[in-house]
Image (cartoon, rainbow, N blue to C red):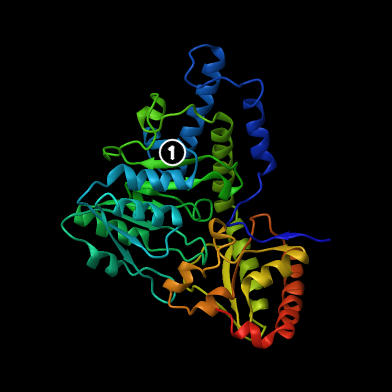
């Protein structure tokens, strides 16, 4: 059976070049980067080279790069590390759960949060962020690219608003990294989180940009690793893999890969929209690989299963919420009713996707939709 993986926003496979870069650091160069003997020096040098690569990727100083376990840790560190009782926090209602659940935790510690809602397009209006600022506001956190719709947020404008107000600014760039050019100076942020496995790197490793002078309390304490900003023995193979994935991502931003991917996404989207009772969730600037489409008279979970049986892997939303019975919080925040939100699927292409992959998806989706609608046209319309 042909298999097409169209769930890249959940995770991506290692590229062969990434695996080859990591291989020596599991075996012959296995040392602890904190050890002073030769094995440790080899590991330490590899971490330093990776830090230099990430600094170039972020457009920051090497000392501003902190390696960690990924996006969730980065988001949690930004929020738990800056906010204290009595502070006010601003974020949006379409953030990843790593931010939303952290805000819930901070509420128990005396931090009030304002959740700014999006426009129906999925875009956050910077003016709404500005209106939410209070004298006690300490931190603003807004994602770069939404994980479900791909909509790119106006982080540069929000960064200017934060700077004018003297408020710290964090960006969850997990879904944007490798798809748009990173530039923390242009964004005006104090903190920015990325994760390797969303950009053809290994799982369990990521990085956090921390601007010099940001008074961030570490989430993990213990040793003096990462300049005392993140305790724990460095995951050297993972860090090397992250750096190699970043190098390849930078190249793909320059060689036309993203333009090719956007064209594939647009062809996929246009083809699916030829079906009656369909539409796109999220308009305007989007990550090149992502589209989110609703299918009327349909239960999204049933369509995910039907497509999987035909060899096409897609998602009903964030991978962190797979199996959840509630509809997408992102789509509900955009003003969509529960039935349509439940009837929506996310298609997110790998950067290695081909025309043949799109051809196959466009052949399978109409068949699956028509079959499911024919099976239960009345029941499907009454779900929720």
The residue sitting at 31% across, 51% down in the picture is 106
Q: Nearer the viewer, residue 326 or 29?
A: 326
Point out residue 144 in the picture as x, y percentages from the top left corner: 43, 58
Q: Nearer the viewer, residue 126 or 321?
A: 321
Q: Is residue 258 above or below residue 60?
A: below
Element at label 1: helix
The residue sitting at 67% across, 30% down in the picture is 23
Q: Horizontally, is 24 left or right of 175 in the view?
A: right
Q: Residue furthest left?
A: 135
Q: Horizontally, is 270 left or right of 138 in the view?
A: right
State the quadrant of the N terminus: bottom right
Q: How many marks?
A: 1
Q: Is residue 196 above or below residue 319?
A: above
Q: Specify few, some or many for label 1: CA neighbours under 10 Å numbering under 14, 14-19, or 20 or more.
A: some
Point out residue 280 in the picture as x, y percentages from the top left corner: 55, 76
**Quadrant of the rendered image containing residue 160:** bottom left
Q: Which residue is mark 1?
A: 55
**Quadrant of the rendered image containing residue 204:** top right
Point out residue 8 in the picture as x, y percentages from the top left corner: 61, 56
Point out residue 325 in the picture as x, y percentages from the top left corner: 55, 67
Q: Residue furthest right?
A: 1
The residue sitting at 65% across, 66% down in the picture is 264
The residue sitting at 59% across, 44% down in the picture is 248
State the quadrant of the C terminus: bottom right
Q: Nearer the viewer, residue 74 or 182?
A: 74
């Amino acid at each position: 059976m042909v298999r097409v993986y169209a769930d890249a926003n959940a995770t991506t496979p290692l590229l062969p070049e990434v695996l080859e870069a990591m291989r020596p650091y599991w075996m012959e160069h296995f040392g602890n980067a904190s050890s002073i003997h030769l094995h440790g020096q080899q590991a330490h040098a590899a971490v330093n080279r990776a830090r230099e690569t990430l600094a170039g990727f972020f457009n920051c100083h090497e000392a501003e790069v902190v390696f960690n376990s990924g996006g969730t840790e980065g988001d949690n560190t930004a929020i738990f590390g800056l906010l204290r009782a009595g502070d006010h926090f601003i974020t949006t209602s379409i953030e990843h759960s790593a931010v939303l659940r952290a805000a819930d935790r901070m509420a128990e510690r005396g931090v009030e949060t304002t959740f700014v809602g999006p426009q129906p397009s999925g875009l956050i209006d910077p003016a709404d962020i500005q209106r939410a600022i209070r004298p006690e506001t300490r931190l603003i956190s807004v994602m770069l690219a939404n994980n479900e719709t791909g909509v790119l947020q106006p982080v540069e404008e929000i960064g200017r608003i934060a700077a004018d107000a003297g408020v710290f600014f964090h960006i969850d760039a997990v879904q944007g990294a490798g798809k748009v050019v990173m530039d923390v100076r242009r964004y005006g942020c104090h903190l920015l989180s990325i994760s390797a496995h969303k950009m053809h790197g290994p799982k369990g490793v990521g990085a956090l940009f921390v601007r010099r002078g940001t008074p961030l309390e570490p989430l993990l304490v213990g040793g003096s690793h990462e300049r005392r900003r993140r305790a724990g023995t460095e995951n050297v193979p993972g860090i090397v893999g992250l750096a190699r994935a970043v190098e390849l991502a930078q190249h793909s931003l320059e060689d036309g890969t993203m333009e090719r991917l956007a064209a594939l996404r647009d062809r996929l989207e246009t083809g699916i929209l030829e079906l009656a009772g369909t539409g796109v969730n999220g308009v305007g600037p989007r990550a090149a690989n992502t589209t989110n489409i609703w299918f009327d008279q349909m239960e999204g979970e049933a369509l995910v299963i039907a497509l999987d049986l035909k060899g096409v892997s897609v998602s009903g939303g964030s991978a962190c919420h797979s199996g959840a019975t509630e509809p997408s919080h992102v789509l509900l925040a955009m003003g969509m009713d529960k039935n349509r939100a439940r009837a929506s699927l996310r298609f997110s292409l790998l950067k290695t996707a081909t025309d043949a992959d799109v051809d196959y998806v466009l052949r399978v989706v109409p068949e699956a939709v028509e079959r499911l609608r024919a099976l239960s046209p009345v029941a499907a319309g009454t779900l929720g």
